[in-house]
Image (cartoon, helix red, strand yellow):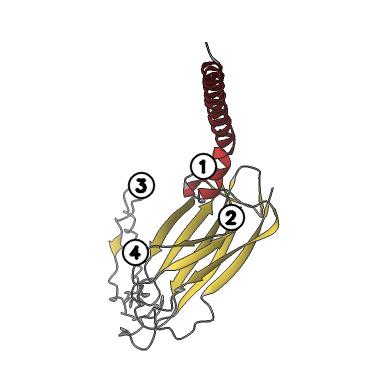
Amino acid sequence: MNTNQTTSSVRQTAINGLAIVGFIALVVAGIWLAVYSTRFVPAVVNRMGSAAVYLGSVFSPAPEPAISVVSTPVASTTLSFDTETAPLASTTTTTTTASPKPAETAAGVKTNGTYSIGTVPATVTPYGLSDLAITISAVGYLTTASTDSFVTSSTVPDNERPAIKFTIKNIGTNWSGTWRFDASVPTRTSYVFKSEPQQSLAPGDSIDYTLGFDRAKTGSDQPISITVDFSHAVPESNENNNNITASFNIL
């Protein structure tokens, strides 16, 4: 074997060795990347996930007008009875009493009386503008995903879902048309819930809501803000009663 053949053999061996080393390096790098990526998958999922919001509602129509009843009572009549005693017979010592005979009585006197139990307002034709107003009735938390599990409390225990009860009512003089509301909730990542379009409310109609959420941000005085008709789609006589804020102590 000459010098050229020896050099060529050494070179080929070196190339083969480098190829093997490179292959092993690629395999190791692939395994390391797989392990490293797996470590960070849960964090990515948590960041991308959004808070769940639980919403329940009950519609209440405007109260029926009061009814006035006029009553015409007839005075009651008391019937009295006179008794007559039969004369004593001269031949006996037994006394007898005649059966009572009803006396003639005068007819009862008719009287009229009016007893008011409320007034009947005249039928009102909607006019002018609606006015959607929001009020908060309670803050608390949900013990399950159902809004029926609401518990009133200013402090939310660990792992429970903060919740709020509020009412939106049309206190104006005209139908509202469809509308929406939003709620800025104190979750770990800032989140604003926007409702689906809500039904038109006649004057006096209202809807009671219970809204809860999870992934809450812990701390004292965590605020929740609710705004009705946030897009200003409803012509209203007063826009200053469309927003309200409450707070939780979330453990």
The residue labelled by disc 2 is: 189
Q: Return the x and y of residue 41 as percentages of the image width and height.
A: 54, 39
- Return the mark for residue 115: none
Q: Quadrant of residue 236?
A: bottom left
From the viewer's perspective, is the residue at label 4 or at label 1 nearer? Answer: 1
The residue labelled by disc 1 is: 144
- Structural crowding at the residue carrying mark 4, measured as other residues with C-alpha within 10 Å and reported as few (<14), some (14–19) or many (≥20): few
230 vs 237: above or below: above
Q: Quick one: SS at disc 1? A: loop
Disc 2/disc 3 C-alpha distance (Å): 110 Å
Q: Quick one: SS at disc 2? A: loop
The residue under the point 53% across, 29% down is 26
Q: Residue furthest right?
A: 220
From the viewer's perspective, is the residue at label 2 or at label 4 nearer? Answer: 2
**Which comes before the other along the chain, label 3 or label 4?**
4
- Structural crowding at the residue carrying mark 3, measured as other residues with C-alpha within 10 Å and reported as few (<14), some (14–19) or many (≥20): few
The residue labelled by disc 3 is: 94
Q: Quick one: SS at disc 3? A: loop
**Which comes before the other along the chain, label 4 or label 1?**
4
The residue labelled by disc 4 is: 81
